[in-house]
Amino acid sequence: MAGIFAEDISQDQVWLLHVDGSSTTQGSGAGIVITSPQGEDLEFAIKFEFKASNNEAEYEALVIGMRMAHEAGARHLLAYSDSQLIVKQVEGIYEAKEESMIQYLQQIKELKTSFDHFQIIQIPREENIKADCLSKLASTLEDYRMRHITIQYLPEARAPLAVQSITLGEDWKIPIIRWIEEDHLPDDQWEATRLKTRAARILYTPLAAVPIYRRRNPCPPGDT
């Protein structure tokens, strides 16, 4: 990372964003990993409720990831993607000809103004494993809202070390709604950041997605 941004930007100011999109016969989705300057990760597997090509999924991942990073407080953002097409188009090296790609690029151009510094870098897929796995998980889930997923950790064959159960239901919306309506955030700063980035997926809608919740009576531009 050294030398990528200006010398007056220290490493403890830079946020990292790893993104990946996946499109399969079962659906499409995005994997997003946001890393704070302190090295803490926020990981998201986002299932798309609309059809998307692989390139569209890659762009959705980048757009959503940039919005989440901004919502988390990033001012200096270094993004990584293993898609050569997306990286080269964002850099202006490749020309976008499809209308959907042009629209995504316009969104990214606008999002870049949210940061003091932004750069995107292409990396090999093997260096983007977390985001890749999350995108594949999201794209293959069919009914994820009320799914009960059991994660088992096996240190050796037939010797489970620990089992953690995760239920994906409606309760996760409550803290977000409290923040939107009552400006209430958790006392823990990192938990507050996690809540804001999760809310970013809802408050800021991808091109083809439909939000499940929006701010009520938002202020017009320029108002506070």
Image (spheres, rainbow, N blue to C red):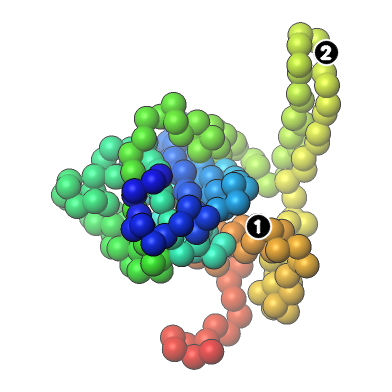
Position of residue 224 measured from the top left corner of the image (x, y, whole percent): 53, 89
Position of residue 81 measured from the top left corner of the image (x, y, whole percent): 38, 41
Instruction: Answer above or below: position of 131 versus 153.
Output: below
Mark 2 lies on a secondary structure that is loop
48 lies left or right of 178: left
Instruction: Answer above or below: position of 184 versus 219.
Output: above
Q: What kind of residue is marked 2?
A: Ala
Q: Quadrant of the N terminus?
A: top left
Looking at the image, which is closer to me, 205 or 27?
Answer: 205
What residue sits 51% from the left and 42% below the top? 31
190 lies left or right of 65: right
Q: Earlier in the sequence, mark 1 or mark 2?
A: 2
Quadrant in the rendering for residue 116: bottom left
Q: What kind of residue is marked 1?
A: Arg
Position of residue 35 measured from the top left corner of the image (x, y, whole percent): 55, 48
Looking at the image, which is closer to me, 41 or 89?
Answer: 41
Report the residue marked by disc 1. 194
Report the residue marked by disc 2. 159
Position of residue 17 measured from the top left corner of the image (x, y, whole percent): 47, 48
What residue sits 40% from the left and 66% below the top? 115
